[in-house]
Amino acid sequence: MIRPIIAGNWKMNKTIAEAVGFAEGLKAALKTPPAREVIVAPPFTALQAVAQAFRGSAVRLAAQNLHEAPKGAFTGEISAGMLQEAGCTHVIIGHSERRTLFGETDDRINRKLRAALDASLTPIFCIGELLQEREAGETEAVIERQLKGGLNNFTSGDIGHLVVAYEPVWAIGTGKTASPGQAQEVHRFIRRWTADRYGKETSAELAILYGGSVTPKNIAELLQQPDINGALVGGASLDIDSFVQMIGC
Ligand code: PGA
């Protein structure tokens, strides 16, 4: 049985002071350890301060990106080791904003996933189709291409150390959520695809999150789907009341 995961992706939002204020509020609101695994992904600048604020709580910390090299002349980039040192246990990799705005390819994402695993960080590996791809009936082909490329040369042992997030690009930040049925269909496809390649047991234990306009209103129905093991939430994770509601729903 997979413990459901609620992860908040703050994107480029919140100053250090705002992030720490949120973390302290969340820690106070989650007096007893939550039944769900809670992960928060602040911007790089707030990671260390937020890690300190969460100390002694069950909340886990994720970064939103990394560079695949351990160190070197890569101006503006951050390595997996640096994230670990700052207190991260997880890292979001291959988010559609990284793919579309920053040109990340499946091959690059594959190297980033490997770098995260090598540093004992749990990657939250994002995949998802564009609206025109869905309308052209290409959803499964796109998902398969992203899985194949991103997970190239991965063993079932590697798969056991990562989380997948299905985020249809047309649902991110648009207020258009995939219906629970539409989301479940793709989650089931991912479950079967990973079972075929990595074995049923590994696939059954793989947490597959849904992301794309998740809110306190629609989260319960999404999480009732058999292959949806949690949510990666953007906009609705920025407000503490709404985030706490989603953790407890
Ligand atoms: P959203 O973002 O919840 O604002 O749609 C989700 C994400 O990008 O991870």
Image (cartoon, grey):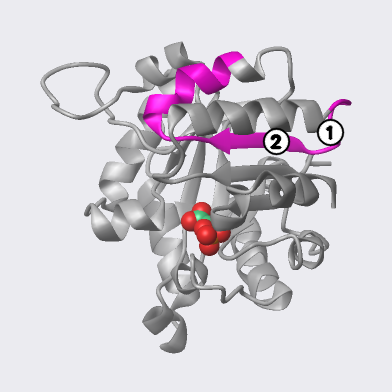
Residue 249, given in percent of the width and then of the height, sits at: 85, 53
Q: Position of residue 202 (x, y in %)?
A: 67, 40
Which residue is at 44% across, 26% downward?
A: 46
Percent x, y of residue 29: 80, 33
Residue in view at x 22 percent, y 16 percent:
71
* Residue most extreme to the bottom: 136
Above or below 81: residue 132: below
Q: Is residue 33 left or right of residue 149?
A: right
Between 106 and 66, the one nearer to me in the picture:
66
Is residue 195 visible in the rendered image? The answer is: no
Q: Is residue 50 magenta?
A: yes
Q: Secondary structure at mark 1?
A: loop
Q: Residue furthest right?
A: 32
Q: Could you tell me if the residues under marks 2 and 1 are in contact, i.e. CB atoms within 8 Å?
A: yes
Question: Does 82 appear in magenta?
Answer: no
The residue that label 1 is drawn on is 34
**Which region shows up in magenta?**
31-52
Q: Amino acid at mark 1?
A: Pro
Q: Residue at x 35, y 56 (%)?
A: 97
Judging from the image, what secondary structure is the residue with disc 2 in?
Answer: strand
Residue 58 is tagged as: none
In the picture provided, is 80 more to the left or to the right than 22? left
Say which residue label 2 marks. Answer: 38
Mark 2 → mark 1, Cα distance in angstroms: 8 Å
Q: Looking at the picture, how far across and down is residue 159, in whole percent?
A: 56, 37
Q: Which residue is rendered at x = 89% and y = 26% of the image? A: 32
Side of 9 relative to 243 (left or right): left
